[in-house]
Image (spheres, helix red, strand yellow):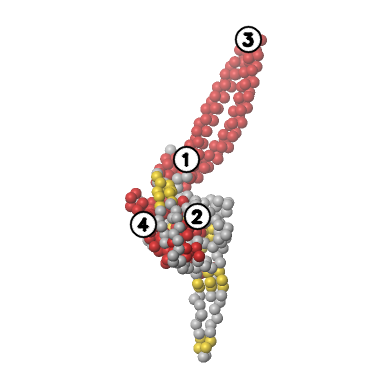
């Protein structure tokens, strides 16, 4: 669900006093901010278990309840005291949620838990990036009709749910603090938000970033053909830089191989489905013809018409042979379709295991 950005346009007037120009009474922009609620009761911290590689990882931290309560109670409106273009105030608005300084201890603790996995599993920069993305993607996608503004990342973590902008803000905040070049991709026309990470080879549309969808488990660098509600992303996004680190995604060649295998297996299944449908009808017609001839020959045998029976035997045998050959061909095609279906489903369902998916994709394309 897309959430509306609430703004209050309040143009401040310049004050004239004693013949001199005064100053603006307010800052040009007042974005949302967290005011910690001291003494807030701690809530139960969620435990996140999510697949990664060929296993499962677990994340659990306990964010400061004062900051979480302050985030929940925050005024989420953006107050403008100057008439700014959307391209100017939209980044200010979203970056306020990502970079509120009271969330830094939360980021530190969460990244410490992620780094423990990175170090234990000896992950390189690409796999570590994929680990962080897999964690955020594992947070349940859910919308709240009573809440029309974005959440602060600490809220998304503690609430154990969020929509496209909530989860994108969390992912971008984490990646920026780990030194990756990262941005929010704001699709105003389609009312969607995703994340972009600097990449070598799988850049999205007119950007220098690889696309990351946060609403479901998916590969870095492969944008969705359509969103869950059928929306197709056809516009160029507003790019909102969040981190300008040197870190980038370098596994694009493997991603392209996986994408080719997904496309090839999907196309092959469609081709085989059409062919199998035609052949199934033909086999049914041949089976009925063969059964009819078999019944006729049985009647001839019972009536003692041996001469007519023997005359039909060669034709029957040819029909039976052709039918058996057609069944064998059908079964070979059915097996191929099953292989393609299984591969496509395996690749589509294992975005958390890019190395394993790459090996399977390579074998399918070259096999």
Secondary element type, mark 2: loop
Secondary element type, mark 4: helix
- C-alpha span from label 4 to label 1: 35 Å
- C-alpha span from label 3 to label 1: 54 Å
- C-alpha span from label 4 to label 3: 89 Å
First in sequence: mark 2 vs mark 4:
4
Reply above or below: 91 against 124.
Answer: below
Q: Going by the picture, which residue comes out furthest to the bottom?
A: 18
Residue 10 x, y percent position in the rendering: 56, 75
Secondary element type, mark 3: helix
Identify residue for label 1: 343
x 52%, y 51%: residue: 224
Quadrant containing the C terminus is top left
First in sequence: mark 3 vs mark 1:
3
First in sequence: mark 4 vs mark 3:
4
x 40%, y 64%: residue: 104
Nearer to us of marks 3 and 1 is 1
Marks 2,4: beta carbons within 8 A? no
Identify residue for label 2: 161
Secondary element type, mark 1: helix
x 50%, y 77%: residue: 26
Q: Nearer the viewer, residue 279 or 160?
A: 160
Packing grade of label 3 (10 A; few <14, some 14-19, many >=20) is few
Nearer to us of marks 4 and 3 is 4
Marks 2,1: beta carbons within 8 A? no
Identify residue for label 4: 112
Check residue 306 in the rendering and tell me which mark sits there, or answer none. Answer: 3
User: From this viewpoint, is residue 102 visible?
Assistant: yes
């Amino acid at each position: 669900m897309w959430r509306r950005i609430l703004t209050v346009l309040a143009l401040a007037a310049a004050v004239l006093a004693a013949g001199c120009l005064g100053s603006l009474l307010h800052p040009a922009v007042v974005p949302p901010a967290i005011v910690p609620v001291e003494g807030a009761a701690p809530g139960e911290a969620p435990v996140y278990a999510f697949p990664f590689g060929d296993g499962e990882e677990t994340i659990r931290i306990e964010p400061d309840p004062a900051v979480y309560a302050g985030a929940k109670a925050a005024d989420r409106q953006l107050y403008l005291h100057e008439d700014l273009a959307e391209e100017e105030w939209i980044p200010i608005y979203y970056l306020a949620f990502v970079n509120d300084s009271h969330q830094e201890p939360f980021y530190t603790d969460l990244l410490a838990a992620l780094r423990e996995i990175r170090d234990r599993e000896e992950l390189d920069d690409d796999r570590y990036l994929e680990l962080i993305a897999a964690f955020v993607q594992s947070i349940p996608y859910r919308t709240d009709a009573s809440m029309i503004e974005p959440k602060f990342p600490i809220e998304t973590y503690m609430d154990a749910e969020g929509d496209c902008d909530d989860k994108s803000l969390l992912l971008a905040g984490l990646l920026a603090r780990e030194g990756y070049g990262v941005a929010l991709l704001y699709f105003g026309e389609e009312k969607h938000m995703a994340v972009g990470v600097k990449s070598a080879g799988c850049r999205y549309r007119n950007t220098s970033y690889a696309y990351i969808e946060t609403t479901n488990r998916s590969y870095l660098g492969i944008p969705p053909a359509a969103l869950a509600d059928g929306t197709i992303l056809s516009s160029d996004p507003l790019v909102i830089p969040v981190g300008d680190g040197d870190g980038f995604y370098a596994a694009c060649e493997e991603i392209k191989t996986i994408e080719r295998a997904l496309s090839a297996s999907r196309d092959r299944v469609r081709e085989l489905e059409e062919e199998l449908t035609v052949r199934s009808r033909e086999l049914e017609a041949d089976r009925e013809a063969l059964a009819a001839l078999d019944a006729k020959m049985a009647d001839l045998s019972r009536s003692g018409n041996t001469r007519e029976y023997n005359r039909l035997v060669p034709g029957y045998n040819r029909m039976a042979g052709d039918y058996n050959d057609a069944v064998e061909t059908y079964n070979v095609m059915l097996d191929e379709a099953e292989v393609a279906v299984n591969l496509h489903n395996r690749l589509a369902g294992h975005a958390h295991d890019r190395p394993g998916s790459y090996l399977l994709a390579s074998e399918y394309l070259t096999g």
